[in-house]
Image: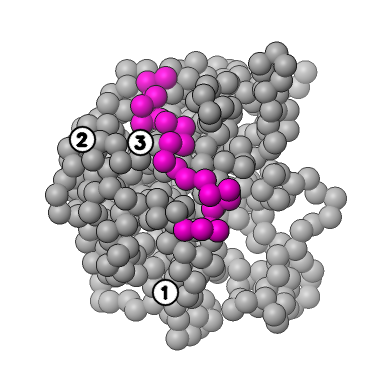
Amino acid sequence: MGSLLHFPEHFVWGAATASYQIEGGYEKGGRGESIWDRFCRTPGKVYNGDTGDVACDHYHRYREDIALMREIGLKGYRFSVAWPRIFPEGRGTLNPAGLDFYDRLVDGLLDAGIQPFVTLYHWDLPQALQDRGGWANRDTVVAFRDYTAAVSERLGDRVAHWITHNEPWVAAFLGHETGMHAPGITDLATAVQVSHHLLLSHGEAVRVLRERGNARTQVGIVCNIAPVQPASESEEDRAAARRFDGYLNRWFLDPVFKGAYPEDMLAWYGDCAPEVQVGDMKAISEKTDFLGVNYYTRSVMAADPEGGFLRIRDVHPENSEYTEMDWEIYPEGLYETLNRVHRDYKAPLLYVTENGAAFSDEVGPDGQVRDPRRKAYLRDHFIQAHRAIQEGIPLAGYFVWSLMDNFEWAHGYSKRFGITYVDYPTQQRILKESGRWVGEVILANGVEA
């Protein structure tokens, strides 16, 4: 038995989900079409032709899921609001039934003693807005501001923690440069402009949430952040790593916390650099209360003249362990990431808003799901989080991805990230070994070293 590493008294242990990945309830309660509904129906875009039409049926089973959270002992639950439930056409006529659902969810969480952390945008843009240009159209920033106002007006008396965007890098570049995600556009200039509008809408939403909030209101943004290391000490590989760090990390963190895009990336994008209007950068850098860090793996980069516009190549280190997503397991990277953002960006508070791993889980003959690799993965990352706290980094909470197995975007239902197993045909939930273990960590407020 090792020693117990204790976490701060009010540390928020939680789990995270996203609306399109778990809710289902397609076309229920007046919900409009999202870009993911359309994308899933585009042949060849999503594994096995899977869709989020039913997903985990959380829309109908949220009470059961709150009971599950309570069984685990969660202190916080991070979920996202589906914009098409609130404004089926993206803007204009409000759908009260959509807000009613989140009203019930928030009340149920609070009754269970669980803090709601609400994400306003986790990639399910109303298709009606995409039909008018989506995030490439600056008008969508205004629509997001109005959507934020409507949600905060209904829930702001009970919700203290707000997240404007989840992983704007993914929405911008996987959605508009590589086309791997909805809406499936493949144009670099569009992706870069979308990234600017996403950041601008973040700043506008912060203002709205401040105006409509109270003394308890805390607002932040969530970015997927990774330490980027060169594959060798050569000047070319170091420059490649610097470019990828600019593309993934600094392009989003610098505007939010420093009020400017990194000069080296503006030069690299050249004619693809975004159109920025007077006042945009001031809006984007509106003061936030916290930064959410989604961490899964590190990036090791080598220079490659044939490697796309960045001229880089991703290197898989040998003798490392990898998840089902083919992501290297590198727990030290969580500490490195938290240390870096604290040092370089001085966010008042940090949360690990997502961290987890996909493995090939199966129900055993006894009806149990044993997932020792996920348990080991989480334990090693929790230890790195504790290390960061011991060094004075203001980490206030940790949200495991994910509460339950769910729709994993372009991978459909082929990847399982949950600490709860979902049998999709029956919608039975089975708490995995890792889920029970997370409950023990929360009860002890500590992890065994």
Residue designated by label 1: 190
**Residue at the spot 33% in from the left edge and 44% down from the top edge:** 82
Q: In the image, which residues are magenta?
A: 42-64
Three-letter amino acid code at disc 1? Thr
Mark 3 element type: loop
Q: Return the x and y of residue 356 as percentages of the image width and height.
A: 60, 39
For marks 3 and 1, give the CA distance.
Answer: 31 Å
- Can residue 223 be spotted in the picture? yes
Q: Quadrant of the C terminus?
A: top right
Residue 411: which disc?
Answer: none
Residue 190 part of the magenta segment: no
* Label 1 Cα crowd, 10 Å radius (few <14 / some 14-19 / many 20+): many
Residue designated by label 3: 25
Q: In this rendering, which labeled residue sits more in front, label 2 or label 3?
A: 3
Q: Return the x and y of residue 421 as percentages of the image width and height.
A: 58, 27
Q: Is residue 83 left or right of residue 183?
A: left
Q: Return the x and y of residue 129 as percentages of the image width and height.
A: 28, 61
Q: Quadrant of residue 358?
A: top right
The mark total stands at 3
Three-letter amino acid code at disc 2? Ala
* Of residues 330 and 92, the one drawn nearer to the viewer in this rendering: 92
Residue designated by label 2: 97
Q: In this rendering, which labeled residue sits more in front, label 2 or label 1?
A: 2
Q: What is the image's colouring?
A: one colour
Question: In the orientation shown, which residue stands out farthest toward the left?
Answer: 93
* Of residues 300 and 81, the one drawn nearer to the viewer in this rendering: 81
For marks 2 and 3, give the CA distance.
Answer: 12 Å
Three-letter amino acid code at disc 3? Gly
Mark 1 element type: helix
Question: Does the CB distance between marks 2 and 3 fall below 8 Å?
Answer: no
**Residue at the spot 37% in from the left edge and 18% down from the top edge:** 112
Mark 2 element type: helix
